[in-house]
Image (cartoon, grey):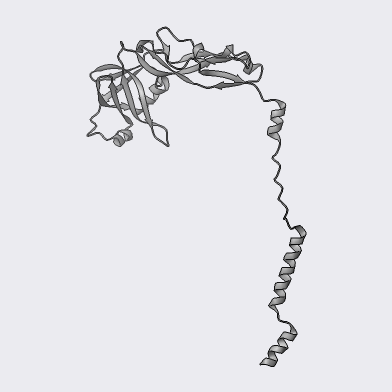
Amino acid sequence: MEKITLKAEIRDARKEKNNRLREEGKLPAVIYGKGKESKPLTISAQEFEKVYREAGQSALLDLILPGGTKKVLIQDVSEHPVRGNAEHIDFYEVSMTEKITTAVPLKFVGESTAVVDQSGTLITNKDEVEVECLPVDLPHEIEVDISVLTDFEKSIHVSDIKVPEGVTIKDEIEETIVTVEPPRSEEELAELEEPLEEAEMPESEHGEEGEEAEGEAKEGEEGAAEPSEAEGKEEKKEE
């Protein structure tokens, strides 16, 4: 991989406000390292986006500063919660003589006959692994050949990954990286297509008798509302 460079300026955190920098197309950043004092920086937002697409967080950068060039990793990128663009960057300065531990993405290459010829579905359980190595040996990505997945019984584990000399994978060797899931059977597909049966409404315990009783109750209420002729005459006599 070609050398990746990015220019940065020392920032006066007391005078230069972060929001104002972003309005000017710049990003606030900081550089720190083992046993080194952290320093606030300013970088071009446009240049950083270009470098980040190429390097990600697993490639060494040459960070060009007024006092010299530093070998760094992009340690952390704070992004806007809605727009998703970078808002603050952490650079970690590395020592070329000390081993570092960082995550490296996996790149799946080749074709699985279990997928192409047997209509299986490729299932990836991990898309990166943690490695330990000297900065000079750090790979930008690690290739995983899936052509060995010739049937649904085969899978690729961490122990199967081949890495360059000087690089050690720190993940558990038994972990599954990728496998192939067989297609669903006709019976399974039929079950998925079956509509759910509508639940039947339970009948009243009293049934029709309950309805008749309810009707009689209503008639009784209506009769009680209007007094009979005899009752009316008696009321008149009393008056």
Q: Determine the residue positioned at 70% across, 46% down.
A: 199
How many numbered discs, if any? 0
Percent of width and height locating residue 160: 51, 11
Percent of width and height locating residue 124: 54, 21
Q: Is residue 149 left or right of residue 60?
A: right
Q: Determine the residue positioned at 71% across, 36% down.
A: 194
Percent of width and height locating residue 61: 34, 17
Percent of width and height locating residue 163: 45, 10
- 4 w.r.t. 42: above or below: above
Q: Determine the residue positioned at 41% across, 15% down.
A: 131
Of the pair 163 and 227, the residue shown nearer to us = 227
Q: Is residue 213 left or right of residue 91?
A: right
Residue 225 sits in which quadrant? bottom right
- 138 w.r.t. 28: above or below: above
* Farthest residue, direction top: 165
Of the pair 87 and 184, the residue shown nearer to us = 184
Q: Determine the residue positioned at 32% across, 18% down.
A: 72
Residue 105 sits in which quadrant? top left
Residue 42 sits in which quadrant? top left
Q: Quadrant of the C terminus?
A: bottom right
Q: Quadrant of the N terminus?
A: top left
Q: Is residue 162 left or right of residue 85?
A: right
Of the pair 211 and 146, the residue shown nearer to us = 211
